[in-house]
Image: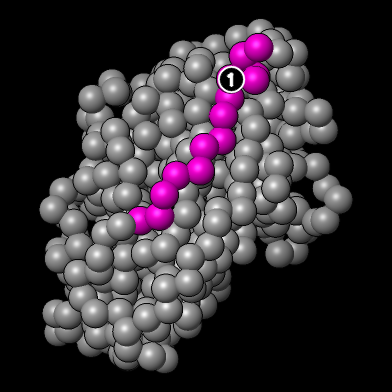
Amino acid sequence: MSERGEAPAAAAAAGVGGEMPAKKQKLSSDENSNPGDLSGDENDDAVSIESGTNTERPDTPTNTPNAPGRKSWGKGKWKSKKCKYSFKCVNSLKEDHGQPLFGVQFNWHSKEGDPLVFATVGSNRVTLYECHSQGEIRLLQSYVDADADENFYTCAWTYDSNTSHPLLAVAGSRGIIRIINPITMQCIKDYDLLGEKIMSCGMDHSLKLWRINSKRMINAIKESYEYNPNKTNRPFISQKIHFPDFSTRDIHRNYVDCVRWLGDLILSKSCENAIVCWKPGKMEDDIDKIKPSESNVTILGRFDYSQCDIWYMRFSMDFWQKMLALGNQVGKLYVWDLDIEDPHKAKCTTLTHPKCVAAIRQTSFSRDSSILIAVCDDASIWRWDRLR
């Protein structure tokens, strides 16, 4: 996949198969990377620049009271805030395969005081790291898929409710979801899906809402736990949902590559140099009562940036949804303050380093928001520590 942004195939839930052996990989400098990898002069050039507020006006009125989700957004308040976040680049390293790293995620399910662990995916590798004080990044584990043509695009953390073991789900071009237990260092098959609504996006420019809390879906999930293939020759009957509970193509005019919930609001982006904050229906509508026939959408605001018009560049938010981060195709990071009264007044901090020049495919905050990790097309990993 080149920097021109050729679209990776969607990772489909086709099952789990094969072994995925753990392997310790080489980093560009050492197995463990520390701040010494960045010289003093280079580190001084890593800057945090405060830019202006978003100046785009909303495409629909936002002065209707009592909106769901971010209650204070859309009430016509225009109190401007100074961006209160700044970061410093304290470390970087590069994985030895040299292929694009498409995904990165911190484990938010760890307990307070536990080490800050994050995972990266790219090529046929899944790698786990641990963040330590003084900017150190320590390599923990690396898993290599048996198929050299596999290309992992995404990862997500959860945990085993019985053992409390962390679990990492990864998926890529082969359409296989693998669940890895870092404690036992094994690839397992069982996984659970939590939540009541799923918002999907794709290359057809559309965004779709799917409810999984219907009686039909709840019964199907329950039956999946009771199904025993050793007691019957009949396969488990999978449920197929052909029509979403809401669908729109009015937000973006190109491939939609990232979507996230923000309370009852939605953040989504395409290849148009803007993250859009919106909601299905009208401002006063309850999202849980939206009908499939609903055609209205309400756009509350846009978070604008530049030089990010290639496909599959994904943003992230911190655990408390107070910060939003996105990288562009020339290695620049944008961090917005979401703890505001109006999205049009969101302040943006721009993070740059002279040696970070490749496309930043994804970012991830640690649970305490003290660390921001970015992964790039040149297999590099960049650690930014929050100063305030």
Residue 181 position within the rendered picture, expressed as x and y whole percent measured from the top left: 67, 44
**What SS does tag 1 mark?**
loop
Please state which amino acid type lies under the numbered disc 1: Asp
Question: Which residue lies at the image location 63% right of the left edge and 28% below the top edge?
Answer: 89
The residue most toward the top is 29
The residue most toward the right is 113
Question: Which residue lies at the image location 20% right of the left edge and 63% below the top edge?
Answer: 251
Circle 1 packing at 10 Å, graded few (<14), some (14-19), many (20+), is: some
Q: Name the residue under label 1.
A: 45
Q: In this view, does 378 lie above or below 341?
A: above
Number of marks present in the image shown: 1
For the residue pair 13 and 267, the one nearer the viewer reads as 267
Residue 48 position within the rendered picture, expressed as x and y whole percent measured from the top left: 56, 35
Residue 358 position within the rendered picture, expressed as x and y whole percent measured from the top left: 40, 21
Q: Is residue 207 above or below residue 269?
A: below
For the residue pair 178 and 42, the one nearer the viewer reads as 42
Q: In this view, does 178 lie above or below 383?
A: below
Question: Which residue lies at the image location 37% right of the left edge and 81% below the top edge?
Answer: 76
Question: Which residue lies at the image location 75% right of the left edge and 13% below the top edge?
Answer: 36
Which quarter of the rendered picture does the N terminus lie within?
A: top left
In the image, 119: left or right of 335? right
Which segment is the magenta one?
Answer: 41-54
Examine the structure image and report whether residue 150 is included in the region drawn in magenta.
Answer: no
Can you tell which quarter of the image residue 360 is in? Answer: top left
Please indicate, yes or no, whether residue 274 appears anywhere in the rendered image: yes
Examine the structure image and report whether residue 46 is included in the region drawn in magenta.
Answer: yes
For the residue pair 187 and 338, the one nearer the viewer reads as 338
Q: In this view, does 31 lie above or below 109?
A: above
Please indicate, yes or no, whether residue 176 appears anywhere in the rendered image: no
Can you tell which quarter of the image residue 199 is in? Answer: bottom left
For the residue pair 8 and 41, the one nearer the viewer reads as 41
